[in-house]
Every structure is written in C-alpha cells, then in structure tokens.
Image (cartoon, rainbow, N blue to C red):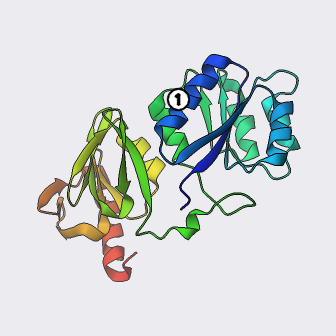
Amino acid sequence: MPEHIRCLIVEDEPLAAEVLADYIGEVPHLELVSICEDAIYASSFLKQNAIDLLFLDIHLPKLKGLDFLKMLSHPPQVILTTAYHQYALEAFEYDVLDYLLKPIEFERFLQAVHKVKMEKTEGGYSNSEVSAEEEFRFFRVNKKNVKVLLKDIVYVESLKEYVRICTEDRSIVTKFQIGELQTTLAIPNLLRIHRSYLVAKNKISAYSATEVEIQGKTIPIGRTYREEVHSILSEFLETGK
C-alpha cells in the first residue's frame, strides 16, 4: 500500500473546506494536495496532477459538482459533500464512494474514507497489492488514529454508540455503531452472531447451539442469528471459507 492517498478538495465555502482539510490531516495515510474553489480550476488542476480521492461539493459556482463529474473521462474516486440530501440517488449513478451531508462529523468522514478502493489507475494505487495479512484500518481513539491489522481482530463488541475492537493482544474503543462498522470493514471473516457481537470465524475454538468460545471468552449466539450462524460455521468447517 502506498504511504498516502492524494486528496483534492473542491469546495467554495472556506469553512467547509477547512473542516475537510483538518479531517484529512488527522488521518495518517491521507495527503491533502490542494483545495480548489471551483470546478473550472479543479479541471485544470486534475490535468496536471495525479489525485486518488476527490472531495467534491455539489453546489459550486460556475459549474455544478455533478456536471463537472460528468465531464471527467477518468475521474479519481469521489466523495460528494453537500448540505442537501435530495441529490443522493442521482449522485450514486456516478459510482461515487459516498455522500456526506454537511455539517460533516469526523466519524462519518472516517466511514467514507475507509471505502477507498485504492485500485490501480494512472497515478492511482491498488489495494490488490496489499495481502490480507497486511490490510489495516485506522480508528479514532482519544484524539489519536490507531492502526489495527484486520487479520488480528478477534471480536467486536457493541457499546451502543461505540464499539470495543479486541485483537489478540489489546482492545480499543472507538465511536462506531456495530452495524456501521460491519458494513464499513466488509471483512468476510467477521461474522455477526449477536446484535452486540461480531466474531472472527477463523479464531473460534468451539461453538454450541447457543454460544461460541473465542480466545478464552464465551460469547452468546443471538436467537435470531442462530440458524444462519450454524449454517455459516458448518460450511466454514468444511471449506475453510
């Protein structure tokens, strides 16, 4: 994986641009290359600079964000920003990564940038170059961004608006709802067995009709999850997938 994802902000509101710039600065693998106040300037900038991720406001002077996006023959990955929710359906027709409503919360920003696919393009990068052993995410913990290797996750426990992510040697608490985290990470090895728990299938040491044992901890299987969990675990034992 490259050290940095090169970011461009296209935003005419100085405060909104400053918020995004601050957020980018908080994430170690993001690099802010420039801020453009309108799409015309951004178009010229993109012709001369390699950009991996574009934060694009929909309501821009001179040329609107979606019209600008239509003009790009080989656009970078795009996260749209706007104060208006009514453009969401149209926006996703352009294969954007995410759609952030202002004012943007940092946790929501992190969810969006975790979706960056890092595919190999001209001037871009590819997540396929990263083995499953090396893939990681950063999580916000007490004003720091903490790196966690995805292969090390043993289980995730819901703490209402927060989750506890437990690995083999530590645990961290970060602001995420468990369903959002499951969607954001999209790790096939992580299995939802209870409304409050995700577990790593390959780290389960034993299971019964009502619970699993993992790293010395017993975790209940929720009643509504039991049939699906037993089916998935049975297949996993047979195929390893």
Residue at image point 51% right, 32% down: 23
Q: Is residue 165 left or right of residue 50?
A: left
83 to 223, vertically: above or below: above
* Place of residue 131 in the rendered image (x, y in percent of width and height, measured from the top left): 47, 71
Residue bearing the label numbered 1: 22
Q: Is residue 38 left or right of residue 163?
A: right
194 to 149, vertically: above or below: above
Residue at image point 33% right, 32% down: 161
Residue at image point 84% right, 47% down: 47
* Place of residue 9 in the rendered image (x, y in percent of width and height, measured from the top left): 68, 34
Q: Farthest bottom residue?
A: 238
Q: How packed is label 1: few (under 14 Cα within 10 Å), some, or many (20 or more)? A: few
Q: Is residue 130 left or right of residue 62?
A: left
The quadrant in which residue 227 appears is bottom left
The quadrant in which residue 36 appears is top right
User: Identity of the amino acid at label 1?
Assistant: Asp
Query: Which part of the image, by quadrant, shows the C terminus?
Result: bottom left
208 to 103, vertically: above or below: below
Residue 48 versus residue 146: which sits nearer the camera? 48
Residue 96 versus residue 56: which sits nearer the camera? 56
129 to 165, vertically: above or below: below
